[in-house]
Amino acid sequence: MIRRILVLTLLLLLITAPPARAASPDPWRWPLDDHAIGERFDPPATDYGRGHRGVDLAGTAGDVVRAVAAGQVVFAGQVGGVGVVTIDHGGERSTYQPVRPRAKVGDAVRPGQVIGVLLGSPSHCSGACLHLGRLAGDDYLDPLDLLGGGRYRLISPDGKPPPPPAGVGGALRRPVGGPITSPFGMRIHPVTGVRKLHDGTDFGVPCGTPVHAAAGGSVVGRSSRGAYGKRVVIRHRPGFETTYNHLSAQSVSVGERVRPGQVIGRSGTTGLSTGCHLHFMVLKGGRSVNPQGFL
């Protein structure tokens, strides 16, 4: 009888006890000692669809790459000719590429421990960059959710402070990664040969690269003709707008509210353009001003 009561009590506890909740992942630390955020997380709509399954951090070939959190190395080698390291953190995994591994499979690593060296090639960025991925099972997640979104970083109090990550220090964030291939200012137009104002900043990125809203606002323009080609215009406040030009695709409509960092289209070479890039403009009171003053 006593045994039967104990069994019934145990069953009752199992039925009425609330389900265990998965522990929240610990915050990650930056894998590069100095970093600037390039292309951001843009999950694909399907398993094999186009998208960006992580975040790119600009760096220099030879930079040491550090573990974002404690865990165990479960892969250190090449995938399709690209050096990759994968660390299991217990429930989630982080991936780093392209790197030359300094850790081997089975190694237990501490947060911030060097696990590899950044390679300059092969790279999908215009320059050297670390592609950092975050996975839970087969699902890709945004690494910036655990890195604090890229807004803050700790720096040494000794020596000259490093430059802040892209998008910090101004009102806007970079809409894409990649190098600046043509700044704001007077130049000889590469197509017409006429000396005139280059009314924005060109970022050299491949066609099809996701383009992100530089800040929150409302879409007030969407066009597909003329010198700017496929274009999106976002109003952030009265008299202050950003435009995204020469797009290959537009993914927002006029009147739509957009969040900071939301994908609003894909880079291209439509309109009067000589190659794949994003022509990014800032308008104050309807007049073009230098975007670099706001990034």
Image (cartoon, grey):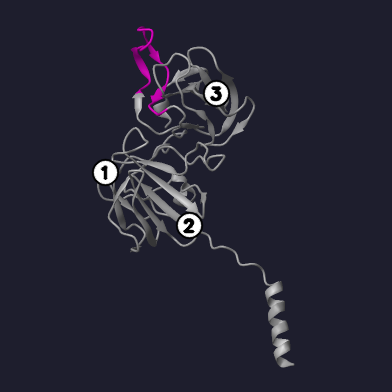
Identify whether 99 is placed above or below 18: above
- Which of the marked residues, 1 or 3, is nearer the chain's N terminus? 1
Mark in front: 1 vs 3: 3
- Residue 150 lies in the magenta stretch: no
- Report if residue 242 is visible in the image: no
Q: Position of residue 4 (x, y in %)?
A: 73, 88
Disc number for residue 160: 1
The quadrant in which the C terminus is found is top left
Residue type, mark 2 in image: Glu
Q: Position of residue 283 (x, y in %)?
A: 49, 21
Q: Would you name the residue on which mark 2 appears?
A: 92
Is 293 left, or right, of 122 in this rendering? right
Q: What's the CA distance linking mark 2 and mark 1?
A: 36 Å
Q: What's the CA distance linking mark 3 and mark 2?
A: 38 Å
Q: Position of residue 132 (x, y in %)?
A: 40, 47
Is 246 left, or right, of 120 in this rendering? right
**Closer to the camera in the image, 27 or 117:** 117
What is the span of residues highlighted in magenta in the rendered image? 182-206
Mark in front: 2 vs 1: 2
Q: Would you name the residue on which mark 3 appears?
A: 233
